[in-house]
Image (cartoon, helix red, strand yellow):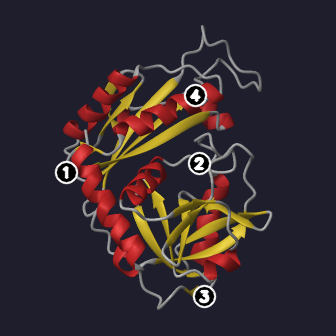
Amino acid sequence: MSRTVYLNGEYLPEEEAKVSIFDRGFLMADGVYEVTSVLDGKLIDFDGHAKRLERSLNELDMASPIGMEDLLAVHRELVRLNDITEGMIYLQITRGAPDDRDFVFPDPDKVPPTIVLFTQNKPGLADNPAAKKGIKVISIADERWGRRDIKTVQLLYPSMGKMMAKAAGADDAWLVEDGKVTEGTSNNAYIVKDGKIITRNLSNDILHGITRAAVLRFAREARMEVEERPFTIAEAQAADEAFITSASTFVMPVVEIDGTPLGDGTPGPVATRLREIYLEESRKTAS
């Protein structure tokens, strides 16, 4: 059955939704995106994603084609139209489609932004079997552009990283710059040592994860110790446990790094408990 998608103010069957070949998202990766999870038919942390979207747009001097209240209504309507109980909503805004290709930004008064939203149905999202056995990661050089704090659609290198991991028999890759882990290909990275949660501090080097912010808040409320600083792969391999966070994986245990098992090679108690807390608390505040 065809999905209903949202394109520039209209709800359309997915096969009828068309974007110009001159759209700058297609030609220049000149766009930003957000992914919001849906659990029990409700949106997880929509306000956080909306605020980050506004920040990304501002950092790129890009106008928003929609207000945040209207955007919330669109999300909810897509959930209803596509009967999503568990899944995700993908949102993308680009600088629009001028008459021709040009490096110079088009006049925003003449070229409106393009906005696209679509749903992805993911039954069992909260009960992902991978969370019970953990995932394996490899380390690769971080060769992305310097503004990783802006959630742009420039995702070629993260895609390459995931393919490198797949070729190595792993599930994902952690990116390393100047000897320190920045983040995962599409997630924030953490280690746990002697009960202390360690994750890189916020800067332009990493995405300011919405799930990251929530998980760290929940951890501190549960009186877990948190230290925000960079760490090395060697330090990670010597850790008691590790995990990643993202809107689509929530809290996902990491059990192996570059072939080295962590602890006994199974998900650790901190990551397991944080996943439980995150899902429980996020469901309470879902919209």
How many dots with numbers? 4
* Mark sitting earlier along the chain (4/1): 1
Asked if residue 1 shows in the view, the reply is no
Nearer the observer, disc 3 or disc 1? 3
Q: Nearer the viewer, residue 41 or 255?
A: 255
Q: Amino acid at mark 3?
A: Thr
Element type at mark 4: helix
Circle 1 sits on which residue?
40
Left or right, 37 with reference to 65: left
* Mark sitting earlier along the chain (3/1): 1
Residue plotted at (50% across, 88% down): 263
Q: Is residue 72 above or below residue 262?
A: above
Circle 4 sits on which residue?
57
Asked if residue 55 shows in the view, the reply is yes
Q: Residue furthest right?
A: 178
Corner quadrant of residue 228: bottom right
> Are the residues flagged by discs 3 and 1 in contact, CB closer than 8 Å?
no
Mark pair 2, 4: CA separation: 14 Å
Assess disc 1: are there few (<14), some (14-19) or many (≥20) residues with their C-alpha within 10 Å of its C-alpha: few
